[in-house]
Image: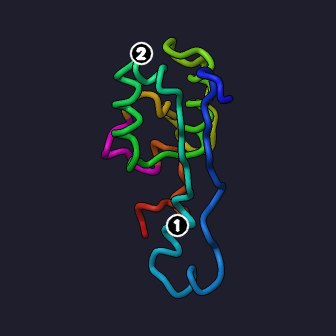
Amino acid sequence: EVSERTALLLLSDHGIHYGRYYDGAKAGAQEHSLPLFYALLPRTLLAAHPSLESALCSNQQRLVSPFDIHTTLRHLLVYPEPPVLPDWSRSFYPLRPRSLLEPIPADRGCAEAGIPPDVCPCQL
């Protein structure tokens, strides 16, 4: 039996990156830059916090990075309190990681997400 305190996250590090479905299709490069990510949370948690369900739904097609996944995992540990995050001020790329448990702006760009320009899916 799955606990009502269990969150299930399915993710991959990248999509396909070789073969006929990569080389021969425009979607190949996009899939490589935009890998799979699914989040399943307990219905009782979603019912108790309607803003959580709303944020997850609105974030379905938002630009996110592994830094956001890290932030989301930290947020799940203390929800509904805000997550305690590392100091990213000295990182190579300017970072402002966001939790997927809160709305992510639709106009968010790769620089804000910490995605290097050479792998930015917005450029495809």
Instruction: Return the residue at label 2.
Output: 48
User: Dot 2: few (<14), some (14–19), or many (≥20) neighbours within 10 Å?
Assistant: few
Query: Does residue 100 appear in this view?
Result: yes
**Residue 51 picture location, percent across and down:** 35, 23
Q: Quadrant of the C terminus?
A: bottom left
Residue type, mark 2 in image: Ala
Q: Main secondary structure of the magenta part?
A: loop
Q: Of 4 and 27, which appears nearest the observer?
A: 4
Q: Disc 2 on helix, strand or loop?
A: helix
Query: Does residue 86 appear in this view?
Result: no
52 with respect to 74 (left or right)? left
**Residue 46 picture location, percent across and down:** 43, 24
Q: Of 107 and 27, which appears nearest the observer?
A: 27
Q: Residue placed at 63% from the left, 61% from the top?
A: 14
* Image position of 103 with respect to 110: above or below: above
Residue span colored magenta: 104-110
Separation of marks 1 and 2 at Cα, in angstroms: 34 Å
Which dot, 1 or 2, sits closer to the camera?
2
Q: Disc 1 on helix, strand or loop?
A: helix
User: Dot 1: few (<14), some (14–19), or many (≥20) neighbours within 10 Å?
Assistant: some
**Residue 50 picture location, percent across and down:** 35, 22
**Residue 29 picture location, percent across and down:** 52, 73
The numbered disc on residue 4 is none
Q: Residue placed at 49% from the left, 14% from the top?
A: 80
* Image position of 85 with respect to 119: above or below: above
* Image position of 4 with respect to 67: above or below: above
Mark toward the start of the polypeptide (1 vs 2): 1
Q: Of 76 and 6, which appears nearest the observer?
A: 6
Q: Residue furthest front?
A: 1
